Image (cartoon, rainbow, N blue to C red):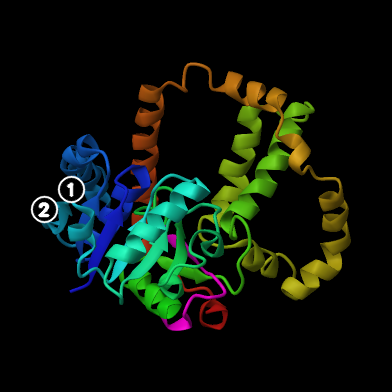
Amino acid sequence: MTEIAIVGAGLIGRSWAFLFARAGFHVRVWDPAPEVLDQLGGDIAAMVARTAPYGQAGPDPKGLGGRIRAEPDLRTALRGADLVQESGPERLETKRALFADLDAAADPGTILASSSSALLASAFAAGLPGAARCLVGHPVNPPHLVPVVEISPAPFTDPAVTERARQIYAAAGQVPVVLRREIDGFILNRLQAVVLAESLRLISEGYVDVVGLDDTVRHGLGRRWAFMGPMETINLNAPGGAADYLMRYGQMMADLARTAARDEAFTPEAAAAVGMAFAGLSTPDAIRARQDWRDGELAALAGHLAGRAHPSPSKDENR
């Protein structure tokens, strides 16, 4: 039986706990805040209730919560774990200190993975005695409903550790993408940053309002990208495939890319404009309610795609 330790029981940590338990793994969860651990059982039960109608709580929804144990002692939580999934604060010094503690306390064969959204393993694990077992396993929020996980090993990570992590994530139902080299922000956030920058520019310069921008993605790019990536999309958008598409439209796309926004789009004015569009919908209660709605929609989408998805034609080649 695969044993998983979750370090940090916030939004991402409890989602990881849910997905590993859904796959039948035994999960121990530690958090420095006792009150967070106290509410873990209720949070997991709510997640089961929200996802089970769409088949996204696994084959044993009633038993899922029983495979998750809140553990107030860190060393006990780590003992015997095959993989530790750390989901602590996104601050480099905090991450360094936490990984030093994990490296000192975890069994020698335990993989130490971070859910970091941008920090590189080479930045927070360098110099540790067990640096070779450290890597990033970056999820997308919420990981129990958005299955991709970006595995970013440091140059010093043992390749066997990377492969074992890939196998564990795959066995948990995730879609692991192994980066060939480290890069800030990994893959998903770098793509997201470019799209977000141009979106903010188009709004700020008056080409479209916030609702129109979101509708363009929701009912356009997002509809297509829900089951197909941009590379396969262009492969289907010209009679001769991707190479033909790039020959026909590459220069046009290059010209558009040349005038697209970069870091200058992230301005206080842009923040104010987007914030105004969601006035009244940005309180903690309103956001939590909308998150719950989103998770229900994602569960329904995941249930639909589960019976229809086909593997990427380049899946094996990209490993």
Tag 2 residue: 62
Local secondary structure at mark 2: helix
- Write the residue at 26% across / 60% down: 5
* Quadrant where the N terminus is found in the figure: bottom left
Instruction: State yes or no: residue 169 in magenta.
Output: no
- For the residue pair 307 and 107, the one nearer the viewer reads as 107
Q: Position of residue 225 (x, y in %)?
A: 57, 56
Neighbours of disc 1 within 10 Å: few (<14), some (14-19), many (20+): some
Residue range in magenta is: 147-160
Neighbours of disc 2 within 10 Å: few (<14), some (14-19), many (20+): few
Q: Is residue 109 left or right of residue 70?
A: right
Q: Position of residue 72 (x, y in %)?
A: 18, 48
Q: Is residue 240 left or right of residue 134?
A: right
- For the residue pair 102 and 149, the one nearer the viewer reads as 102
Tag 1 residue: 72
Q: Position of residue 94 (x, y in %)?
A: 45, 47
Instruction: State yes or no: residue 159 in magenta.
Output: yes
Identity of the residue furthest to the top in this view: 280
Q: Nearer the viewer, mark 1 or mark 2?
A: 1
Local secondary structure at mark 1: loop
- For the residue pair 22 and 313, the one nearer the viewer reads as 22
| Picture quadrant of residue 35 | top left
Image height of 280 relative to 162, above or below? above
- Write the residue at 46% across / 80% down: 158
Q: Please state which amino acid type lies under the numbered disc 2.
A: Lys
- Write the residue at 43% across / 21% down: 283
- Write the residue at 43% across / 48% down: 141
Observer able to see residue 307: no
Q: Please state which amino acid type lies under the numbered disc 1.
A: Pro
Observer able to see residue 187: yes
